[in-house]
């Protein structure tokens, strides 16, 4: 089934390269979150915003107020572009913070990909070079997984292989597309 995937994380990376974002972040956080060549030092920014202390919470709120509106604009544009492509039957918005940001409004259905904590932790340690502490701090700054499950229409069990999870997702998408074609 032809589907398009819109990746919120990629949109977030794009926003962090934009001059207006850099200027706003420099005004709020100072030079300490920038590399010498002017790019944002994501690990340094992460250390400021993913703590549990009140200063980190305020910093995270400030960061989100700067970047989330622009990320939302990009996601809307990418979703519209994907929907305009001939033959595309569905658009999947891949966003870890979909429910926290209000981006759920872009979606007809929410599918939660359920991954056991040890697998999630190992993936980010291997794929993103995070430490176990960085993983825990970021997890603590999102909605609880049980809340995300309750707010979702469907749940994919990703405790097995990627192929098994992909098959579950294909079945859900086929069901959604099939039911929307009938209405």
Image (cartoon, rainbow, N blue to C red):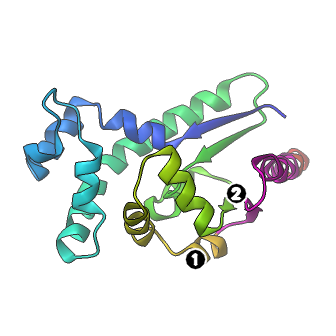
User: Which numbered dot is residue 147?
Assistant: 1
Mark 2, mark 1: which one is toward the viewer? 1
Residue 116: x and y in percent read 65, 67
User: Which residue lies at the image location 44% right of the left edge and 59% below the top edge?
Assistant: 101
Q: Is 94 on the left or on the right of 139, as rendered?
A: right
- Please check the rendered image and state whether residue 170 is part of the magenta-colored stretch, yes or no: yes
What crowding class fits label 1: few (fewer than 14 Cα within 10 Å), some (14-19), or many (20 or more)? few
**Badge 2 or badge 1: first in the primary sequence:** 2
Q: CA distance from mark 2 to mark 1?
A: 16 Å
In the image, taking residue 13 as reference, residue 3 lies left or right, namely: right
Q: Which residue is mark 2?
A: 109
Q: Which residues are magenta?
A: 152-177
103, above or below 41, in the image: below
> Which residue is painted at 79% across and 31% down in the image?
2
Reply above or below: 24 against 87: below
Query: What secondary structure is the stretch in magenta mostly built from?
Result: helix
Q: In terms of secondary structure, where does tag 2 sit?
A: loop
Is 46 drawn above or below residue 177 in the view shown?
below
Q: Nearer the viewer, residue 177 or 16?
A: 16
């Amino acid at each position: 089934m032809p589907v398009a995937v819109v990746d919120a994380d990629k949109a977030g990376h794009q926003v962090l390269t934009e001059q207006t974002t850099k200027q706003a972040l420099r005004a709020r956080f100072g030079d300490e979150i920038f590399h010498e060549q002017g790019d944002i030092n994501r690990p340094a920014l992460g250390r400021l915003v993913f703590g549990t202390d009140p200063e980190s919470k305020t910093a995270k709120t400030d960061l989100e107020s700067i970047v989330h509106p622009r990320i939302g604009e990009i996601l809307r544009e990418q979703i519209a572009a994907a929907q305009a492509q001939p033959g595309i039957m569905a658009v999947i918005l891949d966003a870890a913070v979909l429910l926290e940001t209000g981006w759920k409004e872009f979606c007809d259905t929410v599918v939660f990909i359920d991954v056991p904590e040890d697998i999630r932790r190992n993936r980010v340690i291997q794929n993103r070079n995070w430490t176990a502490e960085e993983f825990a701090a970021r997890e603590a700054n999102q909605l609880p997984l049980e809340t995300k499950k309750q707010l979702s229409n469907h749940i994919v069990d990703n405790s097995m292989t990627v192929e098994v999870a992909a098959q579950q997702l294909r079945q859900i998408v086929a069901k959604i597309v099939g039911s929307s074609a009938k209405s």
